[in-house]
Amino acid sequence: MAPPERGEATIAVAGPGACPVLWALGYLVKAAGFGVVVLGAFTIGHVIDTLRRRRDLPPGPFPWPLYGNFPHLGPTPHRALQRMHQQYGPLVTIWMGNRLTIVIGSPDLVKQTHKDQQERFQHRVLTDFAKISLHADEEGGKSVALAGGKYWKKARKIFVQELMSQKFITAVSIPAMVEEIRSSVDAIRELQEAPFDPHDHLQRLSLNIVFRLTYALRFAREEIDAEGSKFKELMNIINTVVKIGGTNIKANYIPILKLFNWGLQAQQRKTVAKRDEILGRLLAEHRATLDPMAPRDFLDVLLTRQDADSLSDTEVMLIAWEFITAGTDTTSATMHWMTLLLANHPEVQRKAWAEIDRVTD
């Protein structure tokens, strides 16, 4: 056999019996080469498929294979999406893993899609935890925000007719809000300008408002720090639901990541069972003392409509619970941000103070 010419290279691979080390090295080289070919083919296929699908879609950053646009979202997705809207416009296309997602960044477009064409945009994508938490079936979760089909129409109708009615807002909602705001302000004043963490006070404020409207429940100031209180019990459930609902959320879009969810589903089911136990207790207490002619709160209203609207006990509990989840953590977080921003921008704080004085004089 003639020696190779200068500048050429050859690799001769013998069988494993000749030299195991050389055979193994040659095998790895072949495997690596095959892997590179497969990866290259996959990447080319991904690029071609993405370019084809993007032709009729709004603009957006190019997605990574498998991982989609998660790298573009980074640790602060709200800021990343804001930058994308500034760059691409009010409609942005991103891929959450391999799930196509259109992000709307315009109030006018939200009105067009979710109000003017609500029938066409009523479908909701449920995470694995949402399916467990909301006892989902083929029509979606047993709630309003994450339901679909005929059940969504029925649940939404109840919300609009009861919670959004002028009578409920003026006779029940506004008086409860004003009273709770004054109570929270008094509690903070009693601290006599000592440094404090506003978290529990803001959370109690939002919780008291929605719990008064939903279950006719109210929590005193001393219950904030009292271990074993109903306030702590409910807040532990709400905070746990929020925490585990956001654990490894990417696994809902990249299925292979579910391998890292060992034990998570058992924890989710345990939390949901504890929540359902508490909600069932509240339902039983209300049913035992219900006066259909004088409903005290939203749960009473649901009970008076239960037969007419063909609602099961589970549906009654979860529709009421949605009012709690929608109005506590989200409202509390908004007030946290507002407090932080006002503290860091005293000029805005002065403008807000002047406006309040002008309106209330």
Image (spheres, helix red, strand yellow):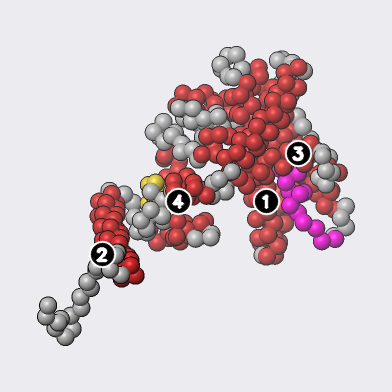
Contact? badges 4 and 3 (CB < 8 Å):
no
The image position of residue 2, as x and y in percent, is 11, 80
Mark nearer the N terminus (4 vs 1): 4
Q: How many angstroms separate mark 1 from mark 3 (CA)?
A: 22 Å
Task: Select label 2 or label 1 by which is in front.
Answer: 2
- Mark 3 burial class by Cα count in 10 Å: few <14, some 14-19, many 20+: few
Quarter placement of the N terminus: bottom left
Task: Select label 4 or label 2 by which is in front.
Answer: 2
Mark nearer the N terminus (3 vs 2): 2
Who's the residue at 82% across and 61% down the image? 195
Read off the magenta span.
194-206
Mark nearer the N terminus (4 vs 2): 2
Magenta includes 120? no
> Residue 115 occupies which quadrant of the picture?
top left
In this rendering, position of residue 228 left or right of residue 45: right
Give the labeled residue for mark 3: 233
Q: Residue furthest left?
A: 2
Q: How many angstroms separate mark 4 from mark 2 (CA)?
A: 62 Å
Contact? badges 3 and 2 (CB < 8 Å):
no
Task: Select label 3 or label 2 by which is in front.
Answer: 2
- Going by the numbered disc 1, the residue's amino acid type is Met
Disc 3 is placed on an element classified as helix
Give the labeled residue for mark 2: 15
